[in-house]
Amino acid sequence: MRKVVTGSQVAQLRNPDPFAVPAWRSPVYRTPFALVAAVQAARLTWRLARFLTRHPIAALAVLAGVLLWGVLGWPGAIGLVLSIAVALVVWRWRFPGSFARWVADPARNRWRAWHYRRRWRPVMTIGGLAELYRGRMLLPVLGKVTSSGHTDRVTVRLVSGQSVADFAALADNLAHGFGAVLCRVRSARAGALVLEFVRRDALAAIIPALPVPAQVNLRALPVGRQEDGQLWLARVHGTHVLIAGATGAGKASLLWSIVRAMLPAMLAGLVRVQAADPKLMELAYGRAIFDRYGRYAADPEAIVAMLEDAVTQMQARAAKFAGKHREHTPTAEHPFVVILVDEVAFLTAYQPDRQLRDRVKAALATLTTQGRAVGFCVVAALQDPRKEVMSIRNLFPDRIAMRLDEPEQVDMVLGDGARDRGALADLIPNGPDHGAGVAYVRLETDPDPVRVRATWVTDNDIAAMAAEYASAPGLRLIPAGGDR
């Protein structure tokens, strides 16, 4: 047997086979205990100083408690604790916004970060996302955790060689591993991603119609709620919106939510709405609003004439703005024009008169390609998103997918790969209580879909809107012709 080599530099493991390959080990150096103690003391001092710097209020509260304990005994410490509790309760009651920003949100973020940190290694290892390299287990690095009342956003730095697709393929494993209802993988900067965990469904219940806003922001109209519990703010100025959904998905309620959010601007003469309602059902209930603040058409020939008049107005405004304005600002002279088209597929594919179909397609194509810069927006709703039904769907920058019948239709509406990124529009329940109004939104500025739910604007709400605003004193807009 070969003699065993010993020493501080290399070591040969004992092996009865004389022809075995030597197994070398790195040298082991003994660090003096005094040096180890000094390094640990320096680390402790640094962490304590950093904690005191980051949490001065908590540090002062603890220091005050210790001093009161020493001076007054336990009554003083208990009085301090009760005083702090009362102050927090009053703060939460009187100033909920600042309390959430400085107390509730940081505390929740730290609690959720501890939750993920505690489970990170076993979930990554069992899920197959921990990579073994040269005998070392390399884990994706857990980053910042931002939590709301319903969702958690976890930043992850990837191991070299990993991709977003590796995590997307194991989204269900991650959701179960961390005790969440759903996990979505969002793209971030190079070498990093964001895991979005849904802990509680904020869209399970019907959302009643929101109050009419006092001020209107056409780039942020409140029309519902997002999955994280925040308001869903839809944009209509500077874009076009395509809404796709099966029968009963809630498209009409979303259209009326948009109209409801614009009512003050319509009353002020800054917005004009032109409604095309070939089904004579969804928009006709509030026709008095459109007759006063825009235009309403239901007959196919009347709809074509309205769309072509809008093209004429748009081109006249473009000629007037040429060389003077690059971005439209709504005024009483040049109001923002929203063209609502319900069930556009009837006009572009199912209309028996081919000449009318071609005129509708030409008008919509012209409005969607040239109307954004001069204050024209097309909001179109349809059931069938196939290309042969809606050949110009790619001209709509912002798209909304409500309940759809087939998985392939999700990518037709929201773009390739949208379903893989979590837009499960084909799995939205078919029911007025659970699925109506639920949708996935893909914006022009963000390829990642966001789950939302539109408010339910009832017939009584529409009747109240028509009674209040159709008869309210205000600037009545010219339904056809050029700008005022």
Image (cartoon, rainbow, N blue to C red):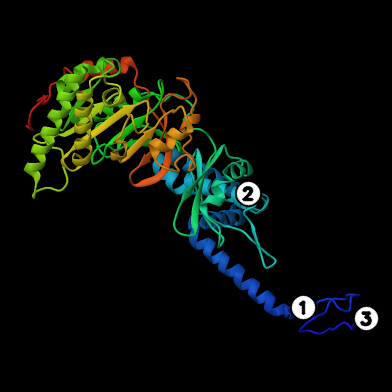
Q: What is the quadrant of residue 449 in the picture?
A: top left
Disc 1 marks a residue whose amino acid type is Trp
**Eyeballing the image, is 28 above or below 287?**
below
Viewer can see residue 215: no
Name the residue furthest right: 1
Q: Which mark is residue 74?
A: 2
- In space, the residues marked 3 and 1 are separated at their CA atoms by 18 Å
Work out which quarter of the rendered image holds the N terminus and state it: bottom right
Report x, y in % for residue 303.
19, 22
Tag 1 secondary structure: loop
How packed mark 1 is, by other alpha carbons closer than 10 Å (few <14, some 14-19, many 20 or more), is: few
How packed mark 2 is, by other alpha carbons closer than 10 Å (few <14, some 14-19, many 20 or more), is: some
Disc 2 marks a residue whose amino acid type is Trp
Q: Is residue 113 left or right of residue 462?
A: right
Query: Of circles 3 and 1, which is in front?
Result: 3
Tag 3 secondary structure: loop
Query: Of circles 2 and 3, which is in front?
Result: 3
Q: What residue is shown at x 65% (from left), y 76% (from top)?
A: 38
Which residue bears the numbered disc 1?
Answer: 24
Work out which quarter of the rendered image holds the C terminus and state it: top left
Viewer can see residue 417: yes
Q: What residue is shown at x 43% (from left), y 35% (from top)?
A: 410
Q: What is the quadrant of residue 175 in the picture?
A: top right
Q: What is the quadrant of residue 469 in the picture?
A: top left
Report x, y in % for residue 361.
23, 31
Query: Of circles 2 and 1, which is in front?
Result: 1
Q: Which mark is residue 1?
A: 3
